[in-house]
Image: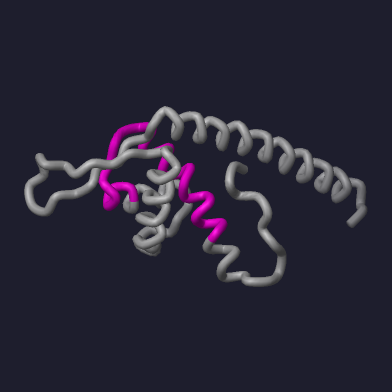
Amino acid sequence: MPGGRGQGRGRGRGRGRRRRVMSFLQPCLLVMLHRSPAHGYNLLNGLDEFGFLPGQQDPSLLYRALREMEADGLVTSAWNADSRGPQRRVYRITPEGETYLQEWITDLKQTRREIDALLTAYEDVQKEGGL
């Protein structure tokens, strides 16, 4: 998956999980921003749709991902001057972000096909009495 390859096995389990979360977090955020611009808080609350546990997301990871995506040109942000109360940043996906998201979706579909083939092969062996 874009930006998600090269994960080591065994060592640094905590750091590896954090990298995987961060790597999966980006396309999830891009999907939400593909739907409509949003504040960070709204994005944080929307992550449960993608399997993140409600209320257990680390806001610092979310804002770090948004800053990295902005530095990479995948999103833009601006202060919302129209908001009542404290001003909040509104994030929007860029055309580069749309392209990156499409690459992720294409790669995920291919990965799903590969996983389905593996599961089918395993289940066929199970039915035949092996394993």
Residue 51 horizontal side relative to residue 85, left or right: right
Q: Residue 18, relative to residue 103: is it above or below?
A: below
Q: Name the residue located 42 percent from the left edge and 50 percent from the top edge.
A: 68
Q: Name the residue located 91 percent from the left edge and 47 percent from the top edge.
A: 128
Classify residue 112 by image quadrant. top right
Region rendered in magenta: 19-43
Q: Name the residue located 77 percent from the left edge and 39 percent from the top edge.
A: 117
Q: Nearer the viewer, residue 80 or 131?
A: 80
Residue 41 horizontal side relative to residue 27, left or right: left
Residue 78 horizontal side relative to residue 83, left or right: right
Report if residue 22 lies within the magenta region. yes
Q: Spot the residue most to the left.
A: 84
The x, y position of residue 60, in whole percent, is: 36, 62
Residue 86 horizontal side relative to residue 98, left or right: left
Quadrant holding the N terminus: top right
The x, y position of residue 74, in whole percent, is: 42, 38
The x, y position of residue 8, in whole percent, is: 69, 62
Please identify the dominant SS of the magenta region: helix
Quadrant holding the C terminus: bottom right
